Image: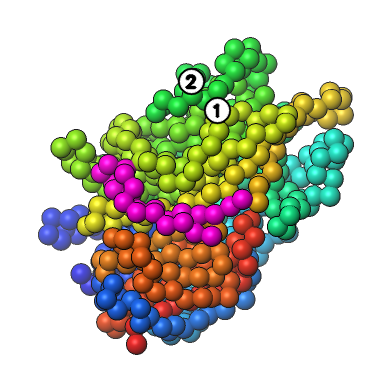
Amino acid sequence: MRNCCFSRGLIFALGGLLISPGVCEQPASDWPVYGYDRSNQRFSPLDQVNTANVGGLQLAWRFATGKTGSFQATPIVTRGVMYVTTPFNHVLALDAATGRQRWRYEHPLPETKTCCGPANRGAAVAYGKVYTVTLDAKLVALDQRTGAPLWSRPLTDSTTDVREAKTALVDERIFEQALVSGATGYSANMAPQVWADTVFAGITGAGYGLHLDVESSSGSALSVVGLSGGGHGARGFLVAFDAHSGAEKWRWYTVPGPSWTGEWRSHTADGVPLNRNLPGEKARAAEYPDTWRIGGGSIWTTPAIDRELGLIYVGTGNPAPQMDDSTRPGDNLHTVSLVAIDAATGKTVWAYQQVPHDRWGYDVASPPVLFESHHAGARVPAVVQASKTGWVFVHDRRNGRLLFKSEPFVPQRNLFTPPSADGVTISPGIFGGASWSPMALDPRRRSVYVAGIHHPVQYFSKSLAVRPDRPWHSFTYTRPLDERSGTITALNIDTGRIRWQRQTELPMVGGLLATAGGVVFTGEGNGRFLALDSSTGETLWSYQGEYGVNAPPITYAVDGRQYVSVAAGGNKLFRFKTGDDILTFVLP
């Protein structure tokens, strides 16, 4: 179907398909939204590049953005123009065939240290506008043709900062030389989602943690610290804005209210023991009745949308305080959950909590993906999500019923063991499993492809001497081990069984792309960009770049030629070399 634009307020029926007002149906040659389509499958029907000829791919163009930092963006391509966001919230429009810059928007940022660095995961393009969220927690709409700002809306008018909490650790002679690299504070880095005259954007930095750079034998490493009490933290949320005016339509809070204590679960919903001290938690419940108001639950990931059911599916982050649980008794609903929300009203339809009362930083961070499952002899509309705990969960997307979980795609050790004074080594740790990296799903081959992280972490829990001049009672912190590697795994989407798996030298952070040509594309932190056989995992082609390839690849076509493109700017949290490249490849 050719690109088409409809006037606002009209609905056209084409072959029985209702098209939402103002939205253009995109040709297969484009990459129109974050996950290729609103199901987030990251599967392209393009097959000009295939298993027989992918070895001939050559660099078509390389563009240096001028903004160095963790580069996580998914470019958007429509009508021959690529729109890409950079670290620190620049937005670029490039000729998709040549890489020539058409315009650049530079967002004025105050000096701030956000929780997880300067990265932005992409823009959304619709209604003649380019939408992007910013580190200072705004939703900005730009003119698609010129990049001129049209309007800007704050996601929130409140702020929070816990950098001063480092003094508690210094007093205890812990991490005395550590550099504060980030802290809780409202921010935003997800690629917005657009549907039915609405832009959906979520907040990050709600989980109350302190990020410290500490020295290890292999160089600087990230330690994450959570402190009890102190009134710190924030409440995560997703906001729906009118795509034309920017007016707020509704706001969904991750933590529902005092009912966030839930059912006091001793096991996860799929039956794994959580090793909780439930009597101790219940004894503290009366002392901390209002901690839900700052209960955390960031929104890290771009939602998927079921247009028939009218539901939006989103993952939520860890509760606050992060890891230290002494002041937040209960299950801490709906943190670390996959949630279905009514897209028109913002009401919760169902929620599945992967880890009640999370103490390990197991955010539901990788984007949910919609597909039709062939389960128990029936076709079931399903949603699949790759977890930090090392399993892929598959649900009936109508009601949240767990259909099954996959075989583990990374090694698991001491899962859900409480942190201790002497330290306990847990894998997956706070890095995952699967972090924010999106999966790719090939519905023809009935496979889903997952980027996995093996990076064991030691968890410590310490009590603090009570003093009137500080509110902290205890703190929990992590020390990453030098042991680390990654996996690329193909899973059967109907059974969860592993079809093939590749081990990688470094943790896999960035995401994947699947194509009808039978090729899966992904990148590594050492700068290598790979094309793998979808059926076997065999390497068919590789390119050695200068910086870590830690962003999700895309593919598109211009004038009958298929291109493959990826942002290559590394990732500071994983100590992968940072830079500012956009690399685009084509067959000769």
Residue at the spot of label 1: 357
Left or right of 66 in this view: 77: left
Which SS type dominates the magenta stretch?
A: strand
Q: Which amino acid, by three-letter code, is at mark 2?
A: Arg
The residue lying at 60 percent from left, 21 percent from top is 329
Is residue 168 toward the left or the right of residue 523 in the image? right
| For residue 503, above or below residue 433 | below
Q: Are marks 2 and 1 in contact (CB under 8 Å)?
A: yes
Image x and y of residue 486, in percent: 50, 54
Q: Residue furthest left?
A: 15
Q: Position of residue 534 (x, y in %)?
A: 31, 62
Considering every residue shown, the one lying at the far bottom of the view is 588
Q: Position of residue 313 (x, y in %)?
A: 38, 43
Dot 2 corresponds to which residue?
265
In the image: residue 15, left or right of residue 588? left
The reply to whether residue 304 is visible in this rendering is: yes
**Residue depicted at 41% across the width and 32% down the height:** 352
Q: Residue at x 33, y 40 (%)?
A: 394
Magenta stretch encompasses residue 125: no
How many numbered marks, from 0 up? 2
Q: Is residue 499 magenta?
A: yes
- The answer to whether residue 342 shows anywhere in this view is no
**Image: 525 above or below 461:** below
Q: Label 1 crowding class (10 Å Cα cut-off): few <14, some 14-19, many 20+?
A: many
Few, some or many C-alpha atoms within 10 Å of disc 2 (few <14, some 14-19, many ≥20)? Answer: some
Q: Position of residue 51 (x, y in %)?
A: 28, 72
Tell me which corner region of the image, top left, top right, bottom left or bottom right, holds residue 219: bottom right
Residue depicted at 53% across the width and 37% down the height: 413
User: Which three-letter amino acid code belongs to the residue tagged 1?
Assistant: His
Marks 2 and 1, how far apart in space? Answer: 9 Å
| 243 vs 276, nearest the viewer | 276
Q: Which residues are magenta?
A: 483-505
